[in-house]
Image (tube, rainbow, N blue to C red):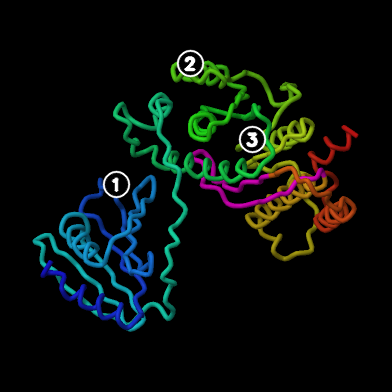
Amino acid sequence: MDEFQELFNVLNQSIERDDFVKITLSKPLSKRNELVNVYIRLISIKDKLHLSFTYRYKTNDQVKNYTIDEAKEIISELLMNSFRFATFFSLKEDLQLFVSKKKKVTFKKQYPSFKNKPPEVHNQPKARKVVSGEYLKHLGVSDKDGNIIHKMADKYRQINKYLEIIDDLVTNSNLPKTVHIVDMGSGKGYLTFALYDFLKNQKGFDVEITGIELRPKLVDYCNDVSDKCGFEKLNFECKSIEDYNEKRIDILIALHACDTATDDAIYKGLSSKAEIIVTAPCCHKQIRQQVKGKEQESPILKYGIFKERQFEMVTDTMRALLLEKENYQTKIFEFVSNEHTRKNVMLVGKKSSKKNNTELISSKIEKIKEEFGVTEHYLEKLIDNKK
C-alpha cells in the first residue's frame, strides 16, 4: 500500500476539497483477463461517503460499493495483480500512475480533464441481465463449464442487450395470461432461446414461442436443442413469413428480416393486433430502387453512401409512422451490431390505449413521399390492400 501512498494522498485531499471526479484502472496485465477496466466514483450511502467500483468485464458489468479505507486496499490489490495503469481525476489535477513489470510505481501529474464534478448519489447503472443456461452450450456460446467462448463474446453481449430491451417492453404491457410470441426469421435461434428462457424461467411468464425460419437444417437443429433443454413450448417451423397464418400473436419479432420481409412481418403483427412489435430492419432495397435515377434536391444525396443511409432512414421512418397510424407508440434506437451485418437499428411498436391523430400522420407520410420521390412503401401497400 505504501507504493500507492501518493495516489491515496491526492484522493484524501480531493475528497476534502470536494472536487473528486473518478479513478479509472486500465491496461490489464494479461489480454486473457476477463476484467477489462474498473471505474471508481464517489457516492453517498446513508449520508456516508463510499467509493463505488464498476467492474467492466468482457460480457457484463458488476457494481460494488466500499468504504474509503476498504477501497484503498482493493485499489492496491488490483494495481499489483491485475492492472498496469490508473488515472485519478479531480477538478484541480489529474494524476497518472503506472506499474512496471517489476512492480515499480511511477506518477505523473497533469492539468485537470474535468471542469464539473458528478453528483455523490447512490445511482448505480442499470445492471445487465447476465444470462446463463444449457442452451448456450448447445448453441456454442459457452463451453461445457458454462464459460463464454471468446469469439462469442459479442453475441453474448447482444443477447443481454436484447433481453434488457424486451424486459422494458413487457414490464408495462397489457399481455394475456399465456403470451404467444412469433420470431420471424429466427435463424440459429440465439435470441429466440434466450427470450424463452428469460420470460419463462426468470420472469415467470407462461409463454409459447414459435420460430419461423426458411432453412430446414436450422429448423431441425433448433427443435433438437429445444428438446434437449426441455423447452416444451418453444418450437420452430420451416416456412416463409408470408405463409405463417396463425391468427394470434401477442409479441411479433423480426430481427434482420431482409428488405420487405420486415414489412411482411410487421403486417402479420398488425393483422394479429399484436401488443408489441420488435424489428431490426435490414437491406432497405424497396425504396432505394424506386428513387434510382431520380434527381434529388438535397446536395447530401449527391453521394452514394449518404443516399443509401438517407433512404434507410426514410424507409424506417415511414414504417414507424405507419405503425403509429395503426395506433402504436414507436421508438427507433441503436441496437448492438449483429455478427453478420452492420445494421444495428431497432424499430419497436407498442400498442397504445390513446387514439393517434391519423390525419396528421398521413400528412407526414405524404410529405416524405413527395420530398424524396417515393411512390409507395411496401408496408403501406399491404395495409391499404387489407382495407
Viewer-nearest residue: 311 or 349:
349
Front position among marks 2 and 1 = 2
x 44%, y 16%: residue: 228
Few, some or many residues within 10 Å of mark 3 (<14, 14–19, 20+): many
Q: Amino acid at mark 3?
A: Ala
Q: What is the x, y in percent for residue 72? A: 21, 65
Q: Is residue 268 left or right of residue 10?
A: right
Start-end of magenta stretch: 326-348
Q: Amino acid at mark 1?
A: Glu
**Residue under numbered circle 3:** 254
Q: What is the x, y in percent for residue 346? A: 62, 46
Q: Can you say whether 148 is above or below 51 in the image?
A: above
x 52%, y 45%: residue: 164
**Residue under numbered circle 1:** 34
Of the two numbered discs 3 and 2 on the same chain, state the one appearing first in sequence.
2
Q: Can you say whether 236 is above or below 101 in the image?
A: above
Viewer-nearest residue: 148 or 47:
47
| Mark linked to residue 227 | 2
Q: What is the x, y in percent for residue 153? A: 39, 41
Q: Give the secondary structure at mark 2.
A: helix
Q: Give the secondary structure at mark 3.
A: strand
Q: Is residue 93 left or right of residue 378?
A: left
Q: CA distance from mark 1 to mark 3?
A: 32 Å
Q: Please say whether residue 39 is one of the residues in the magenta stretch.
A: no
Q: Amino acid at mark 2?
A: Asp
Of the two numbered discs 1 and 3 on the same chain, state the one appearing first in sequence.
1
